[in-house]
Image (tube, rainbow, N blue to C red):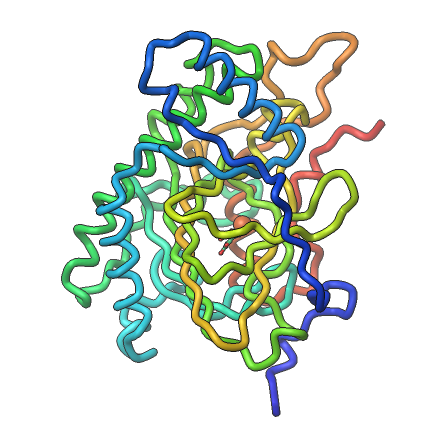
């Protein structure tokens, strides 16, 4: 069969025929956050700290997100993707506004076997007009929400509120795990540039050659992901670089450390590479919430976490410009190396 070569991964990045499914990707119960049992909260904070340090990835249960809200969102998203391309393209994204529907995402210059829909939690949301460092123009982006299915808009609004509450809860636990006051990072999210992304992966006739999403790290502070029961998400294990399948756990959320938290924590926590393997028979849906500060944020290691023995590992960078560069490379194939947070690392 003929497949567009844009989808074909280099040999070293293709999935291996054997799947490694780890039981040890931590599953953390967040119920203690509803209690005043200080010992239980301290134990939870310690668990979160180890998970961030050892894996950069974990799952949470009893997270407080209303499951009826999640179910309504999933149903509306499935109905949206089931429509014709023509219908979906009515809310298609373009080079200026990255919000809406698109099916030509590239990760590291290889096309992903999926289609997406993105919306911003705050509207309008301000982003830099371009990735050019000297261009100070900022533009306002509006969501492109579909008319059909009619329940889509309402579901998005409710869903974003629920998942934002979970993000804030996790942020506070993470602060405590870094030995910081619980509210140390709250100020970065009063105004925010968070997005929700639906990933729909159609069945793929060449799952040995293409990927649902190529290997990448999330540029967010944190990512909160809901996946259905199909599976396919793989995480690169820190200890040996092996790709480990994240087993779908009913009603759990998958949490991962993003690049911003890696820099804030001066690499105590690292943003871990992950990818999605394509499925020859089944559709898959996932919903990601990227918890991001506003565009004018300067990202650098938190001063409380650096000292003479532990000097800063990063030069400061502007989050909005970083986002704009990344967006440009994801929209179309470029002949330049994609921007990575490692470019801001202080060389040793
Ligand atoms: O679909 C998934 O499981 C992961 C998607 C992902 O990594 C992303 O949207 O950044
Ligand atoms: Fe990701």
- Residue at 41% x, 33% y is 294
Q: Can residue 96 be seen from the camera position used here?
A: no
| Quarter location, residue 285 | bottom left
Q: Is residue 112 above or below residue 193?
A: below
Q: Position of residue 313 (x, y in %)?
A: 73, 24
**Residue 25 vs residue 237: left or right?**
left
**In which quadrant will I find the N terminus?**
bottom right
Q: Residue furthest right?
A: 348
Q: Which of the pair 205/95 is nearer the observer? A: 205
> Residue 44 at what x, y percent from top left?
49, 20
Q: Is residue 147 above or below residue 128?
A: below
Residue 22 versus residue 206 in the image, above or below = above
In screen coordinates, is 150 left or right of 202?
left
Instruction: List the single residue furthest toward the front.
Output: 23
Q: Residue at left 38%, top 25%? A: 169
Where residue 181 sits in the image (x, y, percent)? 47, 9
Residue 100 versus residue 28: which sits nearer the camera?
28
Closer to us: 83 or 205: 205
* Screen quadrant of the C terminus: top right
Q: Is residue 94 above or below residue 47?
A: below
Residue 172 visible to an observer of this rendering: yes
Residue at horizontal 60 percent and vertical 56 percent from the top: 275
**286 left or right of 150 in image:** right
Farthest left residue?
150
Residue 233, image quadrant: bottom right
How many labels, in total?
0
């Amino acid at each position: 069969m003929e497949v567009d070569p844009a989808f074909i991964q280099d040999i070293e990045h293709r999935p291996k025929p054997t799947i490694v499914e780890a039981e040890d990707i931590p599953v953390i119960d967040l119920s203690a956050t509803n209690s005043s049992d200080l010992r239980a909260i301290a134990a939870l904070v310690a668990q979160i700290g180890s998970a961030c340090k050892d894996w950069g990835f974990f799952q949470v249960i009893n997270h407080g997100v209303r499951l009826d809200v999640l179910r309504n969102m999933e149903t509306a998203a499935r109905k949206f993707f089931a429509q014709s391309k023509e219908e979906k393209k009515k809310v298609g994204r373009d080079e200026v506004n990255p919000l809406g529907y698109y099916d030509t995402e590239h990760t590291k210059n290889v096309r992903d076997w999926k289609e997406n829909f993105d919306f911003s939690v705050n509207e309008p949301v301000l982003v830099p007009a371009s990735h050019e460092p000297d261009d100070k123009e900022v533009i306002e982006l509006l969501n492109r929400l579909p008319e059909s299915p009619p329940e889509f808009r309402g579901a998005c609004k409710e869903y974003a509120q629920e998942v934002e509450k979970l993000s804030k809860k996790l942020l506070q636990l993470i602060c405590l795990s870094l030995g910081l006051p619980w509210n140390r990072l709250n100020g970065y999210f009063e105004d925010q540039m968070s997005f929700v992304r639906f990933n729909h992966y159609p069945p793929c006739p060449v799952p040995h050659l293409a990927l649902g999403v190529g290997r990448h790290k999330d540029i967010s502070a944190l990512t909160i992901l809901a996946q259905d029961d199909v599976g396919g998400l793989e995480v690169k294990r820190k200890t040996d670089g092996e790709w480990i399948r994240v087993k779908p756990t009913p009603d759990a959320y998958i949490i991962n450390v993003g690049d911003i938290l890696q820099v804030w924590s001066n690499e105590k926590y690292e943003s871990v590479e992950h990818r999605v393997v394509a499925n020859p028979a089944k559709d898959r849906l996932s919903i990601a919430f990227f918890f991001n500060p506003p565009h004018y944020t300067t990202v650098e290691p938190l001063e409380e976490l650096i000292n003479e023995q532990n000097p800063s590992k990063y030069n400061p960078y502007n989050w909005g410009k970083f986002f704009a560069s990344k967006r440009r490379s994801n929209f179309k194939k470029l002949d330049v190396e994609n921007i990575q947070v490692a470019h801001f690392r202080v060389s040793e």
